[in-house]
Image (cartoon, helix red, strand yellow):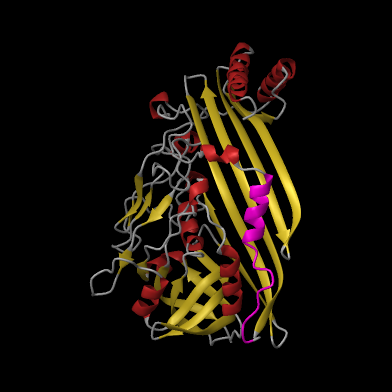
Amino acid sequence: MNGKNEDRARARRCLQMALEAGAQKARVSLNCNVMDLVATLDGAVDRITHCFDRSLSLALFADGRYGVFSTNKIDDETQLRAFVQQSLALVRMLEAEPLRDLPDPARTAKDAREGDEAGLFDPAYGTVGPEQRKGFALFASPWGAAAPDGSWRLISEEGEYSDSLYEQYIVDSQGLECLHRETAFEYGIEVTIQDSRGDRYSGYWWDSAAALRDFDPSYCGRKAVQEAAAAIGPRRLKSGRYCAVIDREAASRLVSPILKALGGYAIQQDNSFLRDALDKQVFPAGMTLRDCPRSIGQTGARFFDSEGVATRDRDIVREGTVRTFFLNSFMAAKTGLAPTTEEPVRPVLEPFWSAASPQPKHIGRDELMRLCGDGILVTGFNGGNSNSATGDFSYGVEGFRFKDGKILHPVNEMVMTGNFLPLWAGLLGAGTDARACQQKSIGSLAFEGVDFSGT
């Protein structure tokens, strides 16, 4: 934050102004994000960007009414006071919402005062300068690559290196004060190659780390080229039911609908295919999905949510049984259920192996293909949609046909369809190969009896 102590003092002053103006309760959230970016195009620097965003959010509870307002003009006390007064006047024009309230102080975070408790802030962030950023961006570029046998050549690349600092500071009128800081070093690149027939194929790869010492983007360009080259010569398959192995890069697409269906808004609005699932076994007995927000130093770790409620490690699904919904204070009051945090912070799907043989130490997509024998390896989803009320889904896919555990050829123009409950009932395995740079720690997955539409 620009003048960190000064900004936090202004946030506390804003809270005081709100109470003095007549609010019974209030919460102030101050967010700051700084990002520097270097983009490349075809092996040369294309653009350089510096972004600084700072905003203050004020939640007001006044006369049984509630509203949230935001501003980025916090340096001038006169303007800040006018913002508070105008916000309070608007709140008093709203309909009463008697169930709105600040969370119970017993539930709020008491151990996040310094901002570094989650282990995601790297002081080395401040040492990175323009030349090093440019070096990261250019060094990772694969521009000029071509197949030794002339079967393809690289015709375009677009890469982006960025480093960023994010901070969130929350105070409320019940004594809450908490701070979160994290840094990120990221690189992503998309390439297009052209084969000897003139057909074009794209590939993408990315990586990120919270600490500079853990960041190495040098392989990303090569990996993106490999992904593109592997897609040459796709074939369409006949429609049918296949075993499906979902690569770790795409696996979270199948977990996210579960998490959304367990959210308070979906439950309260009767828009969830898991609305009646609490404390029931609706997933395979070996499936365990946990929220692990306090995994120090791991991507996505957080000690509090947007209300300031303290996070904790908890079971989402344990041995197939749904153990929790995610409800903020308001949704808990509306549903009559116990409040938790507003959403899962760092979901982790534990390894699962359905074969009779002992579970291997490492379960990656290759092991899962061997487990399945024959099927389709899905490496990405192309559009599609899902129905949160029924659990039905339809996703376009890209990937490979495999047989006897070995990849045969790429596939295209295929659609994966079904319903999430039967899909997950057919879970054969969940991998240990989740990438450290992903907030959802989901490894590769294998399912049996999945419907694919093709020719």
Position of residue 112 relative to residue 201, above or below, is above
- The image position of residue 111, as x and y in percent, is 40, 29
Position of residue 264 relative to residue 368, above or below, is above
Counting labels gives 0
In-image side of 81 versus 355 (left or right):
right
Quadrant hosting residue 372: bottom left
Tell me, yes or no, if residue 210 can be seen here: no
Quarter occupied by the C terminus: bottom right
Q: Nearer the viewer, residue 199 or 334?
A: 199
Question: Seen from this angle, which residue lies furthest top?
Answer: 20
- The image position of residue 193, as x and y in percent, is 68, 76
Question: Seen from this angle, which residue lies furthest right?
Answer: 46
Q: Nearer the viewer, residue 332 or 349?
A: 349
Residue at the (39%, 69%) spot, across then down:
364
Position of residue 103 relative to residue 204, above or below, is above
Position of residue 400 relative to residue 134, above or below, is below
- The image position of residue 8, as x and y in percent, is 58, 22
Tell me, yes or no, if residue 40 can be seen here: yes
User: In this picture, which residue range is highlighted in magenta?
Assistant: 130-149
Quarter occupied by the N terminus: top right
Residue at the (68%, 36%) spot, across then down:
53
Q: Is residue 312 magenta?
A: no
Q: Is residue 136 magenta?
A: yes
Q: Nearer the viewer, residue 260 or 237?
A: 237
